[in-house]
Image: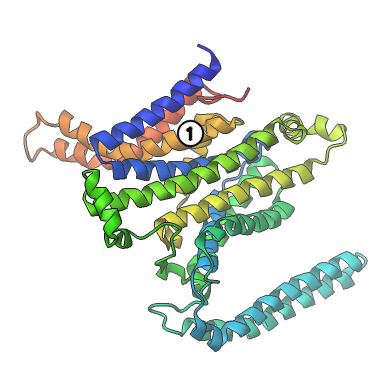
């Protein structure tokens, strides 16, 4: 069997599983799998750019995804005018003060000769600047967070169309990746992984604790949507008539229409990113990145700036993850910082890349859809399987109760099993790099 036929068969199998979900369960569930599969595929492409192209082991994926979610709030939510009037200007002044302190310390480090005087000057700038920053920033934060804390208590956003938040999410993630890359890309792969994980946790800690920014753990709900609201469709006589002609009730039809709208938007974004990733892979730049991945010493001997190229690919991959994070928050309609768990946004994405095929963009897309389908469906299938297995046991049996309760752990068991089987029988992934 040729490679192209095999690859087509794998994608067809995933499509068949999703269609089977629509027939056996509901089309709403199937479309939900499609939408999250599209977002997961985009995240997988971002990680594949870093690992498959350059061999960078980034386990801080959830930090960049969270920055994409933050961009959705900052761009699409309306500004809280009372909070801006109370302390918004002071918060901005505090942030500018902090940035000025960092710039002043950097200039002192660059332009002063290496000496004890330079170290003392930098220490004075940082310590004195910190206290100055807190003196300006903290009162403004208290004033902002005191404005209707039960409903707002934050500065809000720019009230722009939510679709604009998707590229902004990529820019925010790219900016954070630049800062991380400048400090951490000189480390070996294992230390780079530790650094990216730690910085991702710092990003999440800021989101959870800085209420003035995005309400912290109080969450931001009611985010604008790029598609109509179900209730508006249900109140549209033309839509109701069309739904009735298709044999659907207005509630079901409106839900399917909205999910299909998201699917179209997400498909366009995935297709664009996949096209750009393929063009990059086949370009001289992509061949250079793979040469650096395979042998950094030889590539550096040929005159390639390895650290600079690593920084480029790290920023690009993180930006793609940021875009996916903004899309996911838009789909959810709310920003919940506590939901960004390592299991969901780091381990799961890495499983998608490894199972799909590291270094192959189409493999990353396949892995995104396949693993997300399993993540959603394994638990209900496992519960059904346990009920069938334990059917002969008497009611009230301790073993029966234990096995049925264990069905909740089928997700983790299945992910591990799939990963082991793929690494054993197809160690380069289902669609390996050519």
Q: Which residue is mark 1?
A: 367
Q: Residue furthest right?
A: 113
Residue 42, horizontal then vertical, whole percent: 53, 43
Residue 257, horizontal then vertical, whole percent: 34, 50
User: Residue at position x 68%, y 55% from top?
Assistant: 180
Q: Residue furthest top?
A: 1
Q: Is residue 73 visible?
A: yes
Q: In this rendering, is residue 319 above or below 165?
A: above
Task: Tell me the quarter of the image containing the C terminus.
Answer: top right
Element at badge 1?
helix
Task: Decide which of 332, 359 is in the foreground and name it.
Answer: 332
User: Residue at position x 63%, y 45% from top?
Assistant: 317
Residue 155 left/right relative to 234? right
Q: In this rendering, is residue 396 above or below 140?
A: above
User: Residue at position x 30%, y 54% from top?
Assistant: 239
Residue 51, horizontal then vertical, whole percent: 63, 37
Residue 148 left/right relative to 324? left
Task: Decide which of 101, 178 is in the foreground and name it.
Answer: 178
Q: Is residue 201 visible?
A: no
Q: Quadrant of residue 246?
A: top left
User: Residue at position x 28%, y 42% from top?
Assistant: 408
Residue 412, horizontal then vertical, whole percent: 37, 39
């Amino acid at each position: 069997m040729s490679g192209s036929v095999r690859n087509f068969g794998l994608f067809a199998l995933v499509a068949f599983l999703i269609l089977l979900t629509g027939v056996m369960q509901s089309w709403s569930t199937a479309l939900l799998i499609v939408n999250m599969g599209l977002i997961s595929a985009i995240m997988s492409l971002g990680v594949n750019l870093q690992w498959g192209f350059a061999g960078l082991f980034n386990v801080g994926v959830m930090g960049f995804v969270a920055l994409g979610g933050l961009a959705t709030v900052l761009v699409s939510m309306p500004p809280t005018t009372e909070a801006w009037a109370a302390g918004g200007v002071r918060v901005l002044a505090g942030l500018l003060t902090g940035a000025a302190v960092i710039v002043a310390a950097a200039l002192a480090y660059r332009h002063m000769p290496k000496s004890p005087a330079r170290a003392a000057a930098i220490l004075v700038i940082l310590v004195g600047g910190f206290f100055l920053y807190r003196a300006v920033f903290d009162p403004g934060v208290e004033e902002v967070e005191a404005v209707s804390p039960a409903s707002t208590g934050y500065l809000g956003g720019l009230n722009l169309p939510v679709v604009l938040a998707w590229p902004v999410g990529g820019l925010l993630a790219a900016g954070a990746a630049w800062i991380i890359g400048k400090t951490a890309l000189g480390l070996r792969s294992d230390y780079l992984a530790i650094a990216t994980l730690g910085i991702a946790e710092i990003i999440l800690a800021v989101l959870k604790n800085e209420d003035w920014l995005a309400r912290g753990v109080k969450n931001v709900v009611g985010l604008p949507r790029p598609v109509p609201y179900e209730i508006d469709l249900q109140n549209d006589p033309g839509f109701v008539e069309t739904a009735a002609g298709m044999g659907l009730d207005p509630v079901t039809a409106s839900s399917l229409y909205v999910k299909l709208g998201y699917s179209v938007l997400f498909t366009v974004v995935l297709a664009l990113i996949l096209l750009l990733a393929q063009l990059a892979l086949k370009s001289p730049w992509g061949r250079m990145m793979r040469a650096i991945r395979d042998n950094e010493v030889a590539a550096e001997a040929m005159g390639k700036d390895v650290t600079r190229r690593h920084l480029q690919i790290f920023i690009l991959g993180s930006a793609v993850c940021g875009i996916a994070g903004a899309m996911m928050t838009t789909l959810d309609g709310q920003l919940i910082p506590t939901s960004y768990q390592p299991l969901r946004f780091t381990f799961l994405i890495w499983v998608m890349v490894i199972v799909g095929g590291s270094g192959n963009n189409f493999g990353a897309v396949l892995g995104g859809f396949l693993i997300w389908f399993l993540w959603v469906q394994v638990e209900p299938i496992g519960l059904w399987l346990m009920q069938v297995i334990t059917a002969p046991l008497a009611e009230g049996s301790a073993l029966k109760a234990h096995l049925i309760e264990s069905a909740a752990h089928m997700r983790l068991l299945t992910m591990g099993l799939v990963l082991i089987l793929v690494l054993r029988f197809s160690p380069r992934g289902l669609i390996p790099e050519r």
